[in-house]
Image: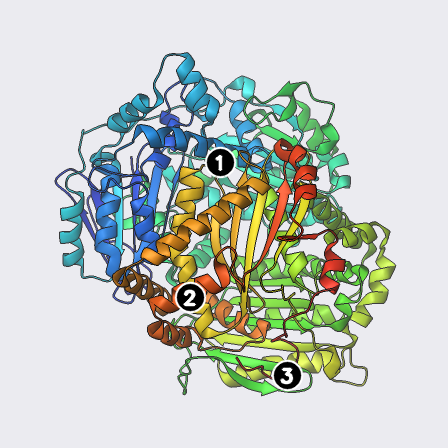
Amino acid sequence: MAVGKEELSEIVKPRTDKREYKRIVLGNALEVLLISDPDTDKCAASMNVHVGSFSDPPGLEGLAHFLEHMLFYASEKYPLEDSYSKYITEHGGGTNAFTASEHTNFYFDVNSDAFEEALDRFAQFFIKPLLSPDATMREIKAVDSEHQKNLLSDAWRMGQLQRHLSSSRHPYSNFSTGNWETLEVCPKAKGLDTREELIKFYQGNYSANLMHLVVYTKESLDNIQRLVECKFQDIPNSDLNPLCFPGQPCMAEHLEILVKAVPIKQGHKLMIAWPITPGIRYYQEGPCRYLGHLIGHEGEGSLFYVLKTLGWATSLMAAEMDWTTEFSFFKVIIDLTDLGHEHMQDVVGLLFKYIHLLQQSGVCEWIFNELAAICETMFHYQDKIRPIDFVVNVALNMQLYPPKDWLVGSSLPSKFNPSSIQMILDDLTQNNVRIFWESKDFEGHTDLVEPWYRTPYSIEKISGSVIQWMHAAPNEHLHLPAANVFIPTDLSIRELKEKVISPIMLRKSSYSRLWYKADTIFSIPKAYVKIDFNCPCTSYSPESEVLTEIFTRLLTDYLNEYAYYAQVAGLNYAITSTDSGFEVTVFGYNHKMMILLETVVDKIAKFTVKPDRFQVIKEMVIKDYENYKFQQPYQQAMYYCSLILQDNSRPWMEQAEVLPHLEAGHLAEFIPMLLSRAFLECYIAGNIEANEAKSMIEQVEDVLFKGSHPICKPVFPSQHTTNRVVKLEKGKSYCYFANGLNPNDENSALVHYIQVHQDNFLRNVKLELLALVAKHRAFHQLRSVEQLGYITVLLKRNYFGIHGLQFIIQSTVKGPGKIDQRVEAFLDMFKSELHEMTGDEFKRNVDALIQVKLEKFKNLSEESKFYWQEIVNGTFKFDRRESEIAALRQLTLEELRDFFGEYIKVGARQRKNLSVRVYGAVHSSEYEADKSSVDQIRCIKVDDILSFRRSQPLYGSFKGGLGQMKL
């Protein structure tokens, strides 16, 4: 039940929020929040049902999750299988669901003109779903495929291990996903019919009085109310009491334990957890937010600062997790270096020293007030997000909070209560702790295995040990954070003289080019700055690429204790390496943005290599490369596809080979070369005036390019970087074969890529429309009917302005060769469906795609990323959406069929396709057979990627200098 349920008062909303809200309760006790937003392009809805995996019957683990899957299939009113998902997809929307411990959430969004019928179809989930016998077996396989995908995921494995080591009498300990064993084999052995149990579960738990619905549309509140009352009043109300799961899942035997576990990936991780009183009971007082803020702080004197200075940790987070209204855990998660792994006891000891410091310091009102002020600013000036994300957040809150706080949730601590903070702090003791320690070093030194994911582990009691570790830990100067100087105080909105609808080139020099877009839409005191450093030296060799990566990570490392305060206050930054250099991004409140940007540029200009930090970062990068082989097979297939097509890409194995031999001295020699020639592509947008934007870039140029001994010089015309893509030959098919990098992963994967054309508005929309029409049909046929695998995707792909279609399928059921055959069989089937498409169907799909393209940007970040993509690709078509809409309006069904027949259809004269096949353990025997039996006339086998790439023609590059290539 919601905490502190009370009579309805006005819903608290952000000052900048122009939407209207209304709470209603239908006659069947369904509680609904109506949201009217006249500016929205998409409409959305979310239903939160107060039942989840904790309610799984014994011996039917995963039943709640399985039911979530089954409700998508069909209903009495709409009996055609998968017609709900088809309708949503074909009207520009998306749909999904998830099952948590105490709730299941279903949600969708769709173009506004299709919302009423979409809502009616959605309502049938909860009125009369079919739960057909035929779908039952297929969807059990889909749930099992989803579980197979997770088997080698450390997050899933460690989460289940924590549950396994808790009371078997509490549902927290259960396996919640479900698989073939729990949903088919075991029930059948007990004489149970899974479908009958599913229907029983649905009828016994899905009741209108246990549901919360959020509906978001552009209609008036009165119109929405009439719609909702009409569509949802028939949901049965069994007047059920929500199931309650009181008590803590951890008994005395589950506390004061040290668990050593073997992960899949390289790296050492420490998770320290304490069962605590759920913070949601005191959500307006924010006790866990206060403690998470301090224990997780990264400024000078913090626990992380000390661990980082000692070379023991690379990241730390502290927060309340895994909580319900009955129990909760406060967790501190630390990524350790090899040295930190050796000093695990000291790391834990320092954590408890910091907790002791908090006990001694008492609860500080000034820290609470500062945190409350930051939270208040963030709430009132929050970015607008997609309606689909918004409705899910609010629907979840409706189950937990009184109506006035449905939008706020726990995000706005406002009542200073030292006793609630002290209560949680008092739970963070040595005799209440659970420590989980992950490392490959424990391989061969464990004696137990978790039953569901087969994670090896050992467990030992540590009664009395932690206090010894605390006393033995080094005496470092731990202290509370200083006052945050980055909290914005000027939140005014600039009055802009000109209303520009797209970026303009504000300034150009031999050093840089500045694109500028003032905010004329969002009216929020935020800005977005992107500076792309094009440095020719980056791509000279594998060594130069790795050293650029280490350089950007070291920059972030050096800035961390200073810039962390800015991040806490809502001013974020990122420094990342790119194929052609590195990027600096600063985004958030504009008031103190220049201070942060100046500091970042100053660090670049005065960069020196600290050998101890170099070694830590080098160790991190080595582990990242070692973990590439543990990527999902479909990710490996996508990597190979990119490597084959992108001319300037380099195999990661080359970087991995040179990395161990690089030392601090190499980086010190490299940085002056890296920065010796540079061109800065810049974009500034938001609540910032043109003269401020110019001034920002002029100051950057002054630091880097001016003075008696400039750090950078302009690049020569020949040094501007390009993006070239391999031009596959018309009428040819290409195949690349690879064994999965992880021999223990049973999953195989296929990427079937069809290259079509270089950026062209009319062809773009033809391809996009085909993808829209075929997307759900592919999902239904290949995943739902043929059950090839949980990951089954069809999407339009854009490699630097070269457009194509891409099928991505991961499977344990069939090998990549057979999946490839099924993709081509689907395309043959789709050819017939396209031929039978009526003019009305065609128009509906065109209108749906136009609606998608007319969708307004939700926030400054979304707008900036769209325009930045045009800049970084070198296409500069800021009016792309308008131009493509104009092309769509002229398109005919015959032209679409001709386009498919010319470029996509199997055997088409101009069809160019590349199949990348990654073979998992289950299909490894097919690898050599498929490779040797490939028809060389029909399919060109790619044996060596680099040799193949060198032998192929390339498309021209849009990117490559100060000129603009015309489309």
Residue receiving disc 1: 146
Q: Which mark is residue 962?
A: 3
Does any portion of residue 100 appear in the rendered image?
yes
Residue 147 horizontal side relative to residue 834, left or right: right
Residue 882 horizontal side relative to residue 635, left or right: left
Q: Which residue is at a point 47% across and 27% down the rendered structure image?
A: 179
Q: Which mark is residue 898?
A: 2
Residue 297 x %, y %: 59, 50
Q: Could you tell me if the residues under marks 1 and 3 are in contact, i.e. CB atoms within 8 Å?
A: no
SS assignment at label 1 = helix
Q: Judge depth for marks 2 and 3 and give the one in front.
A: 2
Q: CA distance from mark 2 to mark 3?
A: 38 Å
Residue 645 x %, y %: 65, 61
Q: CA distance from mark 2 to mark 1?
A: 38 Å
| Looking at the image, residue 66 lies above or below residue 490 | above
SS assignment at label 2 = helix
What amino acid type should be assigned to the residue bearing mark 2? Answer: Asp
Q: Which mark is residue 940?
A: none
Tell me the quadrant of the picture where the N terminus can be found.
top left
Nearest the camera: 895 or 615?
Answer: 895
Q: How is the image coloured?
A: rainbow
Residue 898 horizontal side relative to residue 959, left or right: left
Q: Which residue is at a point 63% across and 47% down the rendered structure image?
A: 636
Disc tally is: 3
Q: CA distance from mark 1 to mark 3?
A: 48 Å
Instruction: Spot the residue most to the top.
Output: 190
Residue 891 x %, y %: 36, 71
What amino acid type should be assigned to the residue bearing mark 1? Answer: Glu
Q: Earlier in the sequence, mark 2 or mark 1?
A: 1
| Looking at the image, residue 813 lies above or below residue 418 | above
Q: Earlier in the sequence, mark 1 or mark 3?
A: 1
